[in-house]
Amino acid sequence: MHWQVIIPLAIFLVSIFCIGFWANARLRHSNSFLADYFLGGREMGGFLLAMTMMATYGSASSFIGGPGVAYQTGLGWVLLAMAQLPAGYFVLMILGKKFAIIARKYEAITLIDFLKARYQSNAIVLLSAFAIFVFLFASMTAQWVGGARLIESLTGVSYQGSLLIFSVAVLVYVIIGGFAAVALTDAMQGSVMILGTVILLIAVIIEGGGVSAIMANLVAENPNFVSPYGADTSLSPLYVSTFWILIGIGVIGLPQIAVRAMSYKESKGMHRAIIIGTIGIGTIMFGMHLIGVFGRAVIPGIEIGDKVMPTLTLEILPPVLAGIVLAAPMAAIMSTVNALLILVSSTLVKDVYLNYIKPKANEAEIERMSFLVTTIIGIAVVGFAIRPPELLIWLNLFAFGGLESAFLWTVVLGLYWNGANKYGALASMVIGLVSYVYIYQFHGNLLGMHTVTIPVIISLLVFVLVSKCTKQMVQQPWMS
């Protein structure tokens, strides 16, 4: 075991646990368990909002899977990854004030609360809950795999043993602390993510003899490593531009990100979060993917892409500094797992259990059910993560596409188009989900475009067409 590396990482984890216990004590004095456990009481300021969005969006894909793909693909993947730069800007500017105002008006705690108030449809509520459960399960599995592989690299413990260690650590503090613990730890985790990225990038450049020497080594191995089209020339302009839908504007449709737009305290904080979040996301996405490419010139021959970042860190940094840097992917993974666990738990408890099973449950019953559901979900994900994929980034991006196909237009048109109705929204969600899964399974990147492109376009057209054709069937149009 790399004990000198593990010690600073352990200090980081202990700090996370302390915040979780503090948040749990705060929950005990809460007037509204649901609002505080699942939304943090809507009290986030600008810095906290920026950090929690960045930490939630920056995940195992950003720190483990992304550098692995960049290691295999070259600078073209860095260019593609930078499409994520305006993600936080899009979410807060497009949802921002209006989403938060309406969420407060209808006392919405989850995204499905908003959809229920907007469309007055049980079918949309249940379909939304199903989509969130299925696709976020896939996304959580990717995070669990990333955490386990990181611990495996550090300790030498088997993958299955590392998975168990990671699972226990995450579940304990998320279950006891809820959203308050998640948001507060995200502030620390987001800062660690930026610091770790900068330290490792500088170290890789120094180890490689400078940028010029690294680029020369890459060109000597394969000139396509420094082209915008990737080592195997698979990154066509059409694919790159449509990939931007998935990790750029489409992020608005991700429930785990959208819910952040209803949890801030005031507009001033939201505006500050846009600036801080954009700078933070840009630093992490550019830095980590560039590390992956440069790492090929420093340590060639790494066969498993997901081990590129841990291997580079352990090989080129002093042990204590390596522990600090490896806290960054651990922070990214844990912060994303936190958010996803809380979101799936809130979906099942608030949107299904309280709506359709036991609407009159008291606070004590809700609290017990919230803790129980969060625990069961976490344990179930462990089962799915036992047999990991070769590169977990593809599992995470699959979940992104599915959620965006279902929710992008139901959220955006629901906010800004009074003519949007439940028939159009339901048809859009069904068509979006079915077409996405079908194209992903049987056609991949159809016509050279990313898989999510056609489902997003079709679901928009279906939404508008069906809403217009059924406008006479809706008794009272939405007036926000």
Image (cartoon, rainbow, N blue to C red):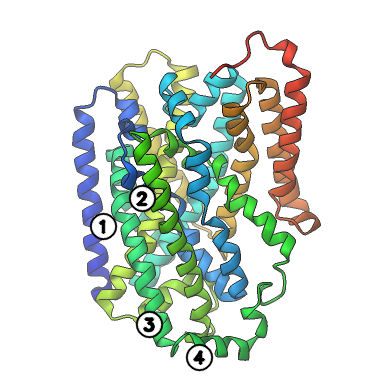
Residue at 34% in and 24% down: 366
Callout count: 4
Please state which of residues 415 and 290 is positioned toward the viewer in this rendering. Answer: 415
Q: Residues within 10 Å of mark 4 (few under 14, many from 20)?
A: few
Q: Position of residue 126 (x, y in %)?
A: 58, 26
Which mark, by number, is residue 66?
A: none
The reply to whether residue 398 is visible in this rendering is yes
Q: Which residue is mark 3?
A: 315
Residue indicated by mark 1 = 13
In space, the residues marked 3 and 4 are separated at their CA atoms by 19 Å
**Callout 3 secondary element:** helix
Between circles 3 and 4, the one closer to the viewer is 4
What residue is shown with label 2? 51
> Which quadrant holds the N terminus?
bottom left
Circle 1: residue type: Leu
Q: CA distance from mark 2 to mark 1?
A: 18 Å
Q: Which residue is mark 4?
A: 213
At label 4, which amino acid type do we have?
A: Ala
Lower sequence index among marks 3 and 2: 2
Q: Is residue 320 above or below residue 392?
A: below
Q: Gap in Å between the C-alphas at discs 3 and 2? A: 29 Å
Q: Earlier in the sequence, mark 2 or mark 1?
A: 1
Q: SS of the residue at dot 1?
A: helix
